[in-house]
Amino acid sequence: MKAIMVMYDSLRRDLLSCNGGPIPTPNFERLAARTVCFDRCYVGSLPCMPARRELHTGRYNFLHRDWGPIEPFDDSMPQILKQNGVYTHLTTDHYHYVEDGGATYHSRYSSWECYRGQESDTWIADLTPPPAEYSPHLIGTKNMNGTLAVMRRRGGWQNDHNREMLHTSADYPMHHTFDNGLDFLDRNAAYDNWFLQIETFDPHEPFTVPGEFESNWFSPDNPFVPDWPPYAKVDEDAETVEGMRKKYFALTQFCDQQLGRVLDKMDQLDLWKDTMLIVNTDHGFFLAEHDWWGKGAAPNYEELVHTPLFIWDPRSPETAGQRRQALVQTIDLAPTLLDFFGMPIPTDMQGKSLSDTIARDVPVRKYAIFGYHGAPVGVTDGRWVLLRAVADKSTPVYEYTHMPTHMRALFSVEEMRTATMAPAFSFTKGAPVMKIESKPNPRFVNALEEGEDLLFDLQNDPAQLCPLDNAAEKQRLLNALAVLLQDSDAPAEAYDRYGLARP
């Protein structure tokens, strides 16, 4: 058996033309015609590395941990495959894999490659003192507080140095990433038992894109320079909003072109007959919907949490071009791949294999939950969705971990002084874990104020413009949330933080 995953970052489901969106994406249309398209796929843990931990482990991350590495007790899908005779290869330009908070993911694969230069990756070394002003690619700096403003200015100028290496589309990190994946296929298509993960940081911001794609949306006589929005409220004028959206549209078309290269290679090598193909993302991105840019600081509306997912299973060829309504999540991908390769699914994985869902739309769950660590939580049945505010912000939050790292730094000595040992959770293989005081991002925590729960009926209000006051539906979803926390062996403080009674 063979499998390929093509994974994007911040790819919007609703904007793809195959889903009725405004971005012409012919290769996603080709993909939709060859695969099963899931209409109710949701994230679990936000943002980037928490989602990738779910991709490996098949279980929710955000109830116990913020951004962090794979833990010693985790069941890692690529590692399980590797240990059982399946060669696994990761090719990526997602630079968080080679930072402190992600540095145990790539080494779970048999081999890997990482291409440099995305966003504020500390790649090009240029000691020229940066000017006092912001990079021309940034907008929204007036929404930043002092510390964030300094970080954003530094990141902007680092990114500008990285862009100095981009002359043609072939120079872009995403192009290199797909080159490596296609080389793997050319070398290894004739062999059996391998899993290839082609993962790109695009269309994550900044929306840096080659000129041939930008020209689809902008006249060379009237260029639009900014391409990097903040995680903040929109207070830019309509022209800036339109320009930023078009930048994202152009980058998504670049992503579509790269997807086409994979589809062409599968055609050329006749891989459809025996190779699973999964195309997915970690989350979406706000492009001024609900008056927000980015993610994190806004409520977790559909644009962020309702994601595209396409799967081709060669064991069910009759399903090509069909759509599925079953409620699925990122945590289902690890069990799906393990099942495809004929391997038992670890008991600690909460996700379910989607093999029967692909074949016959068999449901795998009634409810799904999603959120950031310590911040508001969402629960949905695929039609109704409740965005639950933190009910008691004074309730402490902890990191439960053997791997005390943040995104780009180790835990500080001051943080480690708060550490105690907590008893083992059901999924830590009998090992106690460090319990360390956490300080969730206050912008994320305040995305909803106490008592500001938002309930929506997505069938009648897919744009989530009209929150409802329906006590019965709200209580049903809260009851489901409490059960899912129990099933996840959530820490005791999670119930207090969300104002829930234990089931």
Image: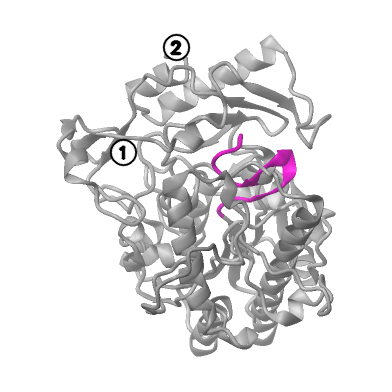
Residue 442 lies, with reference to residue 306, above or below; the image says above
In the rendered image, residue 270, in percent from the top left (x then y), is placed at 66, 82
Q: Main secondary structure of the magenta part?
A: loop
Decide: few, some or many residues near mark 1? Use Cα within 10 Å; few <14, some 14-19, many ≥20: some
**Front of the two marks 2 and 1:** 2
The residue wearing badge 1 is 427
Q: What residue type is labelled 1?
A: Phe
Q: Which of the two residues, 165 or 307, is positioned nearer the viewer here?
A: 165
Q: Which of the two residues, 466 or 31, is positioned nearer the viewer here?
A: 466
319 sits left or right of 269 in the view? right
The residue wearing badge 2 is 501
Which residues fall within the magenta stretch?
Answer: 282-299
Chain-order first, disc 2 or disc 1: 1
Determine whether the residue tagged by mark 1 lies in a helix, strand or loop.
loop
On-image quarter of the C terminus: top left
Residue at image x 45%, y 34%? 442
Residue 32 lies, with reference to residue 329, above or below; the image says below
In the rendered image, residue 427, in percent from the top left (x then y), is placed at 31, 38
213 sits left or right of 20 in the view? left
99 sits left or right of 150 in the view? left
Residue at image x 81%, y 72%? 218
Q: Do the residues labelled 2 and 1 touch (CB within 8 Å)?
A: no
In the rendered image, residue 68, in percent from the top left (x then y), is placed at 34, 50
